[in-house]
Amino acid sequence: MKIKVKTDISNESEKETFELTAFGQYYKKENAVYLQYNEEMEEGTVKTIIKVSDQDGLILRSGAVKMRLPFQINKRLRGSYHTPYGVFETHTLTKRFVHLFDEQTNMGSIDLLYELTMQGAHAGTYHLSITFKEEEE
C-alpha cells in the first residue's frame, strides 16, 4: 500500500506543511480499520498506526517518537506525547474526521482536522490529509 500523508499546521499567523510518502498496510480487524506505516527520522524509525472506527479514531506512534492521540468529532480527548524530557499531556478537539475506502479500486483517504493542545498550551490546528492505494505489481 502506498501512503501519502500531508500535514498542514496552522498556529496564529504561521503555517507549515509536511509531506511524507511511505509504504504500509491497510487492514480491518473487528469493527475498525487500520492504516499502518513506518517513517524514517533522524532519531530512528517511527511506526505509526491510525485506527478508524465508526465514532472515533486514534493515532499511535511508537519507536523514536511515542505518541497517543485519540479523536472523536467535537470532543476534547486526552492523549500523550513522550519526549526525552518526560511525558507531555495532549488534548485533541476534532473538527472533521472523514474516512473513505473504495474496495473496487483499493484506494482510500482519511481527512482529519483537529486542534492540538500540549501541556495546556495551544499547539496549533492540524489538518492531516492521507491518501493510500494498492500499488500495482
Image (tube, helix red, strand yellow):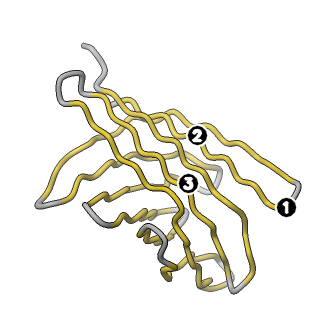
Task: Determine whether, in the image, residue 101 is placed left or right of residue 22.
Answer: left
Image quadrant assignment for residue 10: bottom right
Instruction: List x then y, in percent, for residue 107.
Output: 30, 28
Instruction: List x then y, in percent, for residue 44.
Output: 56, 54
**Quadrant in the picture for the C terminus:** top left
Residue under numbered circle 2 = 6
Image quadrant assignment for residue 54: bottom left
Q: Residue at x 24, y 27 (%)?
A: 106
Q: Residue at x 21, y 58 (%)?
A: 32
Separation (CA) of disc 2 from disc 1: 20 Å
Question: Is 100 in front, or is 22?
Answer: 100
Mark 3 or 1: the one toward you: 1
Instruction: List x then y, in percent, for residue 9.
Output: 70, 53
Q: Secondary structure at mark 2?
A: strand
**Quadrant in the picture for the N terminus:** top left
Q: Residue furthest right?
A: 13
Q: Secondary structure at mark 3?
A: strand
* CB contact under 8 Å: marks 2 and 3: no
Neighbor class of circle 1 (other Cα within 10 Å; few <14, some 14-19, many 20+) is few
Q: Which mark is residue 44?
A: 3
Neighbor class of circle 2 (other Cα within 10 Å; few <14, some 14-19, many 20+) is some
Separation (CA) of disc 3 from disc 1: 31 Å
Question: Is 116 in front, or is 80?
Answer: 116
Residue under numbered circle 1 = 12
Question: Is 67 in front, or is 17?
Answer: 17
Give the mark nearest the N terminus, 2 or 3.
2
Q: Is residue 81 above or below residue 43?
A: below
